[in-house]
């Protein structure tokens, strides 16, 4: 399958073959990252703006490093010191950046749909680095990459996503990616945070945590997104931890080879016991490592790369 898209806005619109193309291309880039010389010239002469209007550690730094590894020129937009603070609109900000002959805009924004909006008003390629509670496509791609790398497949696996589903762009993108690739996805959390509407996306919905974790091959934990909740969705954090947190006792009731994932940032002692986060069962930092290869693959493909066979050196 050859990649033909100019933008990466979501997972929902991707075909399974397109997702596999990204994963295979990322595998080739991971091999490049293990060589003595980790840089390739794929984006030489191209300019990328990292337009993060919402905080980020993992996504922002791994996009920046992936752009460096691809030999791009990089502008790290500083929102706090920008004219957005003086009331300039996102569209005007982005069009002014484009007037500097920018080729790619990597955008994180609190408004769902902001990347799609920019893709309609700009000539540049737009990559969604997380928009509101809508989607976080590169997170889902790196999650799928990590699962495939560790388990050798995705089809047929049971994946439980546990936590604040309602406000999670990661949950939405993961459900699209993993169901398209043949996994059985179960969503679990307090009833106020796991709406039944997700069943229409092909996921199973339950509030029974023991049932959700018992047979899971993958347990992907999500944090409570206080910044998006407009009212209390459960009585207290302590109660959340006791009913839905992954404790040592709960871990003992999972399959011994079930992988523990988390997109980060983690709230130690809330959704995950601190020792479990640092244990051999956790692949949380491997997810971060794989994010670099996945983001290199995405930039390479939206720049016109066709697939893994073109990743040379
Ligand atoms: N997983 C993730 O999106 O983390 P950051 O918010 O730190 O980028």
Image (tube, rainbow, N blue to C red):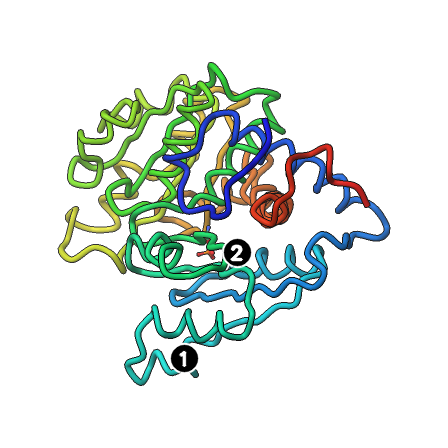
Spatial CA span between label 1 and label 2: 19 Å
Q: Residue furthest top?
A: 156
Q: Is residue 225 above or below residue 32?
A: below
Q: In this view of the protein, which residue sits in the foreground, 205 or 145? A: 145
| Left or right: 3 in relation to 81 | right
Asked whether mark 2 lies closer than 8 Å to ligand 1, one says yes
- Residue where numbered disc 1 is placed: 80
Q: How would you rate the neighbour count of disc 2 (Cα within 10 Å): few for under 14, some for 14-19, many for 20 or more? A: some
Q: Nearer the viewer, residue 276 or 309?
A: 309
> Helix or strand or loop: what does disc 1 sit on?
helix
In the rendered image, which quarter is residue 273 located in? top left
Q: Earlier in the sequence, mark 1 or mark 2?
A: 2
Q: What residue do we see at 20% from left, 55% from top?
A: 229
Q: Which mark is residue 58?
A: 2
Q: For the residues labelled 1 and 2, say whether their Cβ atoms are less than 8 Å apart.
A: no
Question: SS for tag 2?
Answer: helix
Residue 149, given in percent of the width and then of the height, sits at 62, 29
At 44% from the left edge and 23% from the top edge, which residue is drawn?
254
Q: Residue at x 49, y 74 (%)?
A: 99
């Amino acid at each position: 399958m050859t990649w033909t898209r100019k933008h990466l806005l979501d997972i929902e619109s991707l075909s399974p073959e397109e997702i596999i193309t990204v994963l295979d291309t990322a595998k080739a880039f991971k091999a490049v990252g293990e060589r003595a010389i980790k840089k390739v010239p794929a984006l030489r002469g191209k300019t990328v703006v990292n337009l993060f209007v919402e905080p980020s550690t993992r996504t922002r730094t791994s996009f920046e490093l992936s752009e460096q590894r691809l030999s791009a020129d990089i502008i790290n937009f500083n929102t706090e010191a920008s004219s957005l603070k003086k009331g300039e609109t996102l569209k005007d900000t982005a069009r002014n950046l484009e007037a500097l002959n920018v080729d790619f805009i990597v955008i994180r924004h609190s408004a769902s749909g902001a990347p799609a909006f920019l893709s309609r008003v700009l000539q540049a390629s737009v990559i969604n680095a997380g928009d509101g509670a809508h989607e976080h496509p590169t997170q889902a791609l790196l999650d799928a990459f990590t699962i495939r790398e560790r388990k050798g497949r995705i089809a047929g696996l049971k994946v439980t996503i546990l936590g604040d589903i309602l406000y999670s762009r990661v949950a939405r993108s993961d459900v699209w990616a993993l169901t398209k690739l043949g996994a059985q996805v179960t969503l679990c959390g307090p009833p106020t945070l796991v709406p039944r509407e997700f069943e229409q996306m092909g996921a199973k919905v339950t509030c029974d945590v023991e049932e959700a974790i018992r047979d899971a091959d993958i347990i992907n934990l999500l944090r409570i997104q206080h910044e998006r909740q407009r009212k209390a969705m459960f009585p207290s954090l302590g109660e959340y931890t006791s009913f839905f947190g992954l404790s040592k006792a709960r871990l003992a009731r999972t399959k011994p080879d079930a992988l523990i994932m988390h997109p980060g940032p983690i709230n130690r002692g809330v959704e995950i016991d601190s020792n479990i986060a640092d244990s051999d069962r956790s692949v949380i930092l491997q997810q971060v490592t794989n994010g670099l290869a996945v983001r290199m693959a995405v930039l390479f493909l939206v720049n016109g790369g066709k697939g893994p066979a073109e990743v040379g050196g």
